[in-house]
Amino acid sequence: MPPQPNTAPPASAHTPANTSADCPAGTAAPIDSALLFHGATELPIDHRGVRYRLRQTSLGKLILTK
């Protein structure tokens, strides 16, 4: 039989360390914040019809406001 090609996704600096198998039931796998912000400091989030703002401070902390 010929060898099977490697179908694993390429490694990325933004790949989370944990997989969904490592998370408790009902919890999503972690997402690197760099993937969300794309260099911006604010991210608008719509949740159940309400607009929230996720902001990254100059010290790298996250603040979620309504």
Image: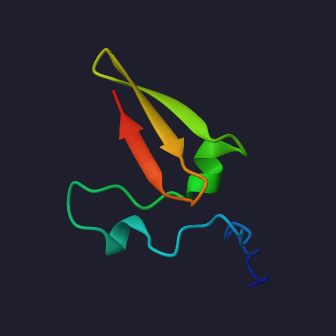
Residue ID at (71%, 73%): 11
Residue 26 shown left or right of residue 36 in the figure: left
Give the x, y percent position of residue 10: 74, 69
* Residue farthest front in this picture: 58
Count the labels in the image.
0
Residue ID at (63%, 50%): 35
Residue ID at (30%, 68%): 23
Residue 58 shown left or right of residue 3 in the figure: left
Give the x, y percent position of residue 42: 58, 36
Q: Which quadrant of the structure image shows residue 16?
A: bottom right
Give the x, y percent position of residue 65: 36, 33
Which of 56/19 is in front? Answer: 56
Q: Which quadrant of the structure image shows residue 47?
A: top left
Which of 9/23 is in front? Answer: 23
Asked if residue 51 is positioned above or below residue 11 in the image, the reply reads above
Which of 10/51 is in front? Answer: 51
